[in-house]
Image (spheres, grey):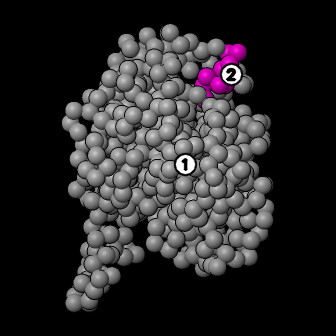
Amino acid sequence: MKTMIKPIISTLALGLLCVMGSCTKDFEKINTDPISYGKETWDPNYTLSSSQLFYTGSFDFAYDTWRGNLIYSATMMQGLSTVISYWAGDKYLLNEGYTAAYWGNGTVGAYIEQVRNIQDVIVNTKDKPELNNLYQVARIWRAVIFARLTDLYGDVPYSEAGVGFYGKIYKPKFDKQQDIYTDLLKEVDEAVAALKTDGDRVFGDVIYKGNIDKWKRFGNSFLLRLAMRLVKVDEAKAKQYATKAVANTLTSNTENAYISHDESGSRVTQNRNSQVLLGDGGQECYYVKWSNTFIDFLKKNNDPRLGLVAVTKLYLKDDVKAQNPDYVSNAAVQKGMPNGKDLSSDPKYKISSDPSFTTFPDYSSPNPKMIKRNGVTFILTYAETELLKAEAAQRWGIGGSAAEHYKNGLKASITYLNQYDSELAITDAIAESFAVANPYDASKGLEQINMQYWAHTITMLDFYETWANWRRTGFPKLTPVNYPGNATSGTIPRRFPYPSTEEAINGENFKAAAAAVPGGDNLAGRVWWDK
């Protein structure tokens, strides 16, 4: 993985040096160097690498991950909890800069770092049969990028996005989410079918290293996720594409899609969640904890994951960011922190007034093995896929036994933790014993499936997906917080508002999209599929 990421570091480093003026001295040489990138020498494989890496978060200090994935999604879904005042999501407060972070601006964010890069790959491989596999992988990856964007915001620039250079479109229209999903399903379906195991090698792929069989299974698994998003708004289409997908999805944890990070590249290549949760930018290491909702769920079920994903006494003082090597992983003492609390003097909200409070180190933190700088960011897993297949089987009787898929998903969500670190391994025997003791019950199947999906995506630290699936299913039945001044009348937010900067740069399209949001362009408004 590391060797694939190094070209990104070199390119970014060169760009930064040029900005600071270091390139002016040898400007003519650099711009005539035969090995420099140009129309004939530029390789789209490395641009695919960039787009994949930046999907895990911005190169600029985890800009979007910090705000979108952690400050908002993680706390709203009661995976994490915090008393840090600027973590607005924990209290359903609106910080427009934070909710706009994933969309981004002219420097960072999904449109500039992900969409532009993947669009470059697609445009420059589309009509080149010798690059067919790279083109098809890029189509799948573009769908991954836009699925998250539209899930977070609703109607977004899609068909005209990222083509300003090629099509001279500088004010792209906002496509309807219904139309976006229709095209995403088509694109992934077609791309999977067009991949050729005997075709060109995709060597810029930092996820599967060009393994086309795995990309086919990834594509079908992602197609299934896309299809299941539509169960409340277009069940016929959901069933149609789920039926197409279920026969060739991920088959085990060995096919999980993730990106392994490189500590040597500083902000550019290090794990984004780790940069925040290790306290690089503030006191998150001390004041961000697992939510009591999550910890209590694991405790109630005597879940074997509890003693591995959670530890106490990891950080002992708020001004010391060194981890305590004698942290405690004993499942019996793990304790989550309630959401909606602060450090104020108001006894109704201050954390020290809560019956659970003793000291901050006594609340559970994520295991340090999960937040290593050179750790992994999970994109899509076998466990997620099996749980979605269980739901498809429960709803429509397709793809086999709901009980079997549920058991597979539950076991995989327990045993996959070793991909963070070998010390987090749980044996198949323990997972089997837990699954047998907690069998599938069709009478409450949808709740069971999606409770486990919630717990699994929390351990993946993919809180964007946790939030999306909660909005889709309503599970788990979370108890909202009702903090003073919240922006949603004490209800859990349903979407991110559009960035206000769009009004200035794309005013007509922005106003039309904002006016069309069911419930209004705010935290309580809803995306199309969220009925």
In this rendering, the count of numbered labels is 2
Residue 308 lies, in percent from the top left, at 35, 27
**C-alpha separation, residue under disc 1 versus residue under disc 2:** 47 Å
| Comparing labels 1 and 2, the label whose residue is closer to the camera | 1
- In this view of the protein, can residue 346 be seen by the observer? yes
Residue drawn at point x = 28 percent, y = 71 percent: 13
Residue drawn at point x = 65 percent, y = 32 percent: 477
Instruction: State yes or no: residue 443 in magenta.
Output: yes
> Alpha-carbon neighbours of circle 1 within 10 Å: few (<14), some, or many (≥20)?
few
Relative height, residue 95 to residue 527 (above, below): below
- Residue 228 sits in which quadrant? top right
Instruction: State yes or no: residue 142 in magenta.
Output: no
Q: Which residue is mark 2?
A: 394
Relative height, residue 135 to residue 243 (above, below): below
Q: Which badge, 1 or 2, comes first in the chain's sequence?
A: 1
- Residue 245 sits in which quadrant? top right
Which amino acid does the dot numbered 1 rest on?
Asp
Residue drawn at point x = 48 percent, y = 42 percent: 351
Q: Which residues are magenta?
A: 442-450
Residue drawn at point x = 64 percent, y = 79 percent: 504
Residue nearest the observer in this picture, 443 or 478:
478
> Alpha-carbon neighbours of circle 2 within 10 Å: few (<14), some, or many (≥20)?
some
> Which is the main secondary structure of the residues drawn in magenta?
helix
Q: Is residue 83 left or right of residue 425?
A: right
Q: Which residue is mark 1?
A: 346
- Residue 439 sits in which quadrant? top right
Residue 137 lies, in percent from the top left, at 48, 50
Residue 41 lies, in percent from the top left, at 34, 71
Q: Tags 1 and 2 in contact by the CB under 8 Å rule?
A: no
Which amino acid does the dot numbered 2 rest on?
Gln
Residue nearest the observer in this picture, 191 or 529:
529
- In this view of the protein, can residue 207 be seen by the observer? no
